[in-house]
Amino acid sequence: MSFTIAIIGRPNVGKSTLFNRLVGQKLALVDDEPGVTRDRREGQARLYDLDFTIIDTAGLDEGAKGSLTARMQEQTETAIELADALMFVIDARVGLTPTDRAFADFARKANKPVVLVANKAEGKHGEIGAMESYALGLGDPVQISAEHGEGMGDLHEALSALVPATSDEDDEGEDDEDISEEEAAQRPIRVAIVGRPNAGKSTLINHLLGEERLLTSPEAGTTRDSIAVEITWQGRQFRVFDTAGLRRRSRIEEKLEKLSVADALRAVRFAEVVVMMMDAQNKFEEQDLRIADLIEREGRAIVLAVNKWDLVERKPNQISQLRIDADHWLPQVKGAPIVAVSGLIGEGIDRLMTAIQEAYAVWNRRLPTAALNRWFEQAIQASPPPAVSGRRLKLNYITQVKARPPSFVLFCSRADAIPRSYLRYLTNSLRETFDLPGTPIRITLREKANPFAHKRKRPS
């Protein structure tokens, strides 16, 4: 099992910046406003020859009040329990504060190895603040600048006494390159949970995990950055991303919320299946339709989850009506699985996880060439392409070039003249014939080379 280090300290000392530096990606949101990080976030860190798991935590601020703050501190305490060692971070430019001193005692009581990190130590003022930190009694401070990457060698030296060195291993690719259906069935499925604020995304993931891993609150906007958690469900592995709620563009005013939305969009692009959550009492609103359109444009498999189903008065044929409404409002992903769930009490969770696996399988599907050719001939016979300016458009043949999502190239004459309505006809026919519900389907037009073009008489 990987060696685990938790980064702790008061708000705004640069914990998330250090986290991003160690994992090599901007996974955690960073802003000048204190308290950006709320949930604990895990990542795989690498520092020269050291590989370890790093946990970013909410800032410990003993003066803050409120239930949300208390639960943020619970998340930090849980991270400390899970960790093998701690990195206690202070702001060297500010110097020691009473909060630093109080939580240095907190770190000592954890009875785990502690590496004292004096961040923002560049310049004269930073060096003076770093010297002050000797008073904490946590050993020699490691002076770094997480933002500029300074002092990483010294940090490596301090950590090498704790973390076992590991040899280089080939990392598994995380891109959308075409893979076989057998390989797809073995890999963890990357799932992003998206939706409007307060749709119940974090509550659902907590139920899947069986613990209060993610902060939840009646207040919209509790989740700020995308948190990844590992889930095993009936023997299948999933990597699930909780994301910030997506508001209308006109409602996104604060800089921090813009960062949160950008982080959620990155999670959609990284995911393979996206679960779009809607509130059962306010479903298929304008923003829901925009989010679904975004998922389709990004080419991700989609599953529709209608949450808070336990709050809805039960009527006959409600599930059938959900199917009708989904196909009416979201024709671009017609047939996408739709599941009624309650993240709070766990209703419909088995159906949701099954729908995710089925959507993933469809997204990875390759069609047999012979069957594709038979379908193509029948489709153009049943509804030939329209004539344009008195000339019939000629469709030569179609081939599947990739899966993830299913993508095809259609060779034809006068590609610019084929109407979008005819492409929609072919897409819907493909979806129905080969049972491709909900997944985006890409058809690219390409003009077949004219074999007689070189014989045309050139002007003298």
Image (cartoon, grey):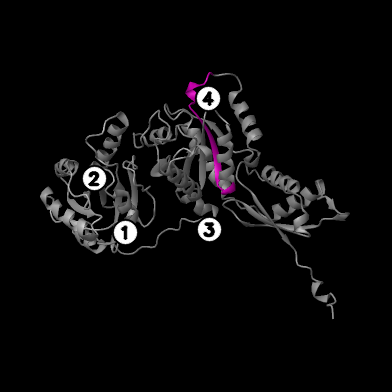
Q: CA distance from mark 1 to mark 3?
A: 25 Å
Q: Nearer the viewer, mark 3 or mark 4?
A: 4
**Residue 384 visible, this orientation:** yes
Q: Which residue is mark 3?
A: 177
- Label located before the other in sequence (2 or 4): 2
Instruction: Tell me the mark number nearer the camera, choosing from 1 and 4.
Output: 4
Q: Residue at x 24, y 40 (%)?
A: 60
Identify the residue under disc 4: 281
Residue 9 is labelled as 2
- Gap between marks 1 and 4, in whole Å? 45 Å
Image depth: mark 2 or mark 1 in front: 2
Where residue 111 sits in the image (x, y, percent)? Answer: 15, 44
Residue in the image at 52% along x and 55% along y = 176
Check if mark 1's residue and mark 4's residue have beta carbons within 8 Å.
Answer: no
| Magenta-colored stretch includes residue 252 | no
Which mark identifies residue 46? 1
Mark 2 or mark 4, whichever is nearer to me: 2
Q: Which residues are magenta?
A: 297-313
Please give the count of numbered marks on the rendered protein. 4
Instruction: Give the mark nearest the N terminus, 1 or 4.
Output: 1
Judging depth in this view, the residue of 332 and 173 nearest the camera is 332
Residue at figure coordinates x 67%, y 44% from the top left = 431
Q: Residue 249 versus residue 235: which sits nearer the camera?
A: 249
Q: CA distance from mark 3 to mark 4?
A: 39 Å
First of labels 1, 3 by sequence position: 1
Q: Is disc 1 placed on a helix, strand or loop?
A: strand
Secondary structure at numbered mark 2: loop
Q: Earlier in the sequence, mark 3 or mark 2?
A: 2
Q: Are marks 2 and 1 in contact (CB under 8 Å)?
A: no
- Residue 460 on image: x %, y %: 84, 81
Q: Is residue 238 visible?
A: no
The answer to whether residue 273 is left or right of residue 78 is right
